Image (cartoon, rainbow, N blue to C red):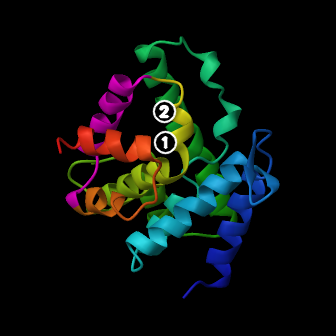
Amino acid sequence: MPNEQFEKAFTTFDAYNANDPNLEQFEGKEVPKELLYGQRMTDRLNEFSPEAPVYLQLAARCQHIGRWEIPRQSYPMDRKGYLQWRTAEKMHQSKVADQILQSCRYDSGTIEKVKGLLMKKGLSTDADTQVLEDVICLVFIEHYLDDFAAKYDDEKVIDILQKTMKKMSARAIADVGKIKLSDRMSRLISRAAGH
């Protein structure tokens, strides 16, 4: 059951992400993009892994905390620049999460677990990191894939989907079938999966 400390952490994460100047249309309102993303991560984690430990729930909620504070354009617009930006983002998110969790009086063990998850430590070996990665991929496919794919041709989208699926567990890939997708995305996911 959520306790006061847990509620305070979520409220503080959300208050931080409410500062995101990038807005997204949601249910007829404009909502800060990363605030909505954090809520979608929690919803998906609760569905995918309802017994997730507290540190995993915290990591999911603050997965993109303060993401807008390091613009993608501040790094070269190539693969190397993208990877440098992703690393800088992970470090920034870990630092912000650390400060918030300390302010909520979480113990150092919990804080280190959250930071390790945000840094994606042990992606292929750690069960908690895999669950977080599965949730990230499912949220991307459900809420962001259509807009993202609109910028690319089918072959490029299939390549991206294959790379995404390589990071997912068999259970998460099976869960993609439960997501309502556009005709184009259903077709491309089917092709990416080799069906």
Residue ranking furthest to the bottom: 1
Q: Residue at x 43, y 46 (%)?
A: 183
Distance from Cα at disc 2 to Cα at disc 1: 6 Å
Say which amino acid is labelled 1.
Answer: Leu
Q: Quadrant of residue 93?
A: top right
Residue that label 2 marks: 149
Q: Are marks 2 and 1 in contact (CB under 8 Å)?
A: yes
Q: Position of residue 46 (x, y in %)?
A: 47, 74
Residue that label 1 marks: 145
* Magenta stretch, main secondary structure class: helix
Q: Is residue 120 visible?
A: no
Q: Residue at x 32, y 32 (%)?
A: 158
Foreground residue among 53 and 37: 37
How many neighbours does mark 1 have within 10 angstroms: few (below 14), some (14-19), or many (20 or more)? some
Q: Position of residue 116 (x, y in %)?
A: 41, 51
Vertical placement of residue 89 versus 81, above or below: below
Q: Which residues are magenta?
A: 153-170
Residue ranking furthest to the left: 194
Q: State left or right for residue 188 relative to residue 113.
A: left
Tell me the quadrant of the picture where the N terminus can be found. Answer: bottom right
Element type where label 2 sits in the image = helix
Q: Quadrant of residue 11?
A: bottom right
Q: Is residue 166 visible?
A: yes
Vertical placement of residue 12 versus 84, above or below: below
Tell me, yes or no, whether the highlighted magenta stretch contains residue 156.
yes
Q: Residue at x 39, y 80 (%)?
A: 51
